[in-house]
Amino acid sequence: MGKLVLYGLLASPPTRSCCLTLKALDLPYEFITINLMVGEHMLPEYLQKNPQHTVPLLQDDELYLWDSHAINAYLVRKYGKDDALYPSELVQRAVVDQRLHYDTSLMFTDSLRELTKRLLFLNESSVPQSKIDGVAAVYDMVENFLGENDYVAGSELTIADFSYVTSIGGLTAYLALDAAKYPAITAWWDRMKQLPYYEQANAEGAAQFEAMVKAKTYTVEP
Ligand SMILES: N[C@@H](CCC(=O)N[C@@H](CS)C(=O)NCC(=O)O)C(=O)O
């Protein structure tokens, strides 16, 4: 097995989704911090590895792979003892893929990344109400995805849960999750916290992210 290196930032939700997958698969890896706050992701040596300048980035011997969803799928396919976290069966995989694309397009990118970019990277002092409404719409959708299921893509834990637990966790820094309104998300999140590697892979970085957002003073504009 090659040496795995994960370049990332603990506060970054997609980085932590990869930490969760690595831990779930019990894979040893080196973690190299790329501090976005001081622009380390824009340095030529990083751009050479990932021209899209995002974290996380996985190095597996000569392969450099970015995008957390692609990384997580790759890790399960290459190193998983079975395909449980990213099922090979056509329909099950299609549902997992749909959940992942929802994270890439809407939940993380359009909601969480956009809000965070405005406040932490562009240093803006307000966010539009429409963006906070967008967070509520994401909660509605994930509550719907979960339905009666234990996990976001059905009855079994998959890599989609790792993306969702980090993205939803980040969104709660902007809009608290109302347990009465979102009982399925609340129960699922509690279930995720029971995973033996959850604390180590997600808790510290999630607290760091929340502290960064909460340290900002901002208004919500109509
Ligand atoms: N779809 C990507 C998104 C990654 C992403 O946007 N990461 C943020 C940090 S949480 C980042 O690297 N921002 C810096 C930039 O895009 O220049 C993934 O899932 O890995």
Image (cartoon, rainbow, N blue to C red):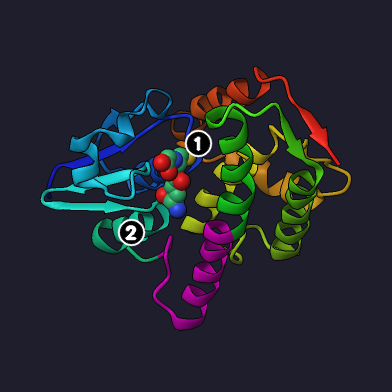
Vertical position of residue 91 compared to residue 206: above or below: below
Residue 104 forms part of the magenta stretch: yes
Vertical position of residue 203 compared to residue 110: above or below: above
Residue 85, quarter of the rendered image: bottom left
Residue 124 forms part of the magenta stretch: no
Whole-percent x and y of residue 79?
A: 25, 56
| Magenta stretch, main secondary structure class | helix
Under tag 1, what secondary structure?
helix
User: Foreground: 115 or 125?
Assistant: 125
54 relative to 60 in the view: left or right: right
Which residue sits at x=55%, y=42%?
166
Whole-percent x and y of residue 65?
A: 26, 53
Mark 1 closeness class: few <14, some 14–19, many ≥20 residues within 10 Å: some
Dividing the image into 4 quarters, which one contains the C terminus? top right
> Which mark is on residue 76?
2
Which residue sits at x=48%, y=29%?
11
Q: Which range is magenta?
A: 84-105
Name which residue type carries label 2: Val
Mark 2: is the Cβ under 8 angstroms from ligand 1?
no
> Which mark is on residue 198?
1
Which residue sits at x=57%, y=50%?
108
> Where ligand 1 lies, by quadrant?
top left
Q: Which residue is at the far top?
A: 215
Name which residue type carries label 1: Tyr
Under tag 2, what secondary structure?
helix
Whole-percent x and y of residue 141?
A: 73, 61
165 relative to 54 in the view: left or right: right
79 relative to 67 in the view: left or right: left
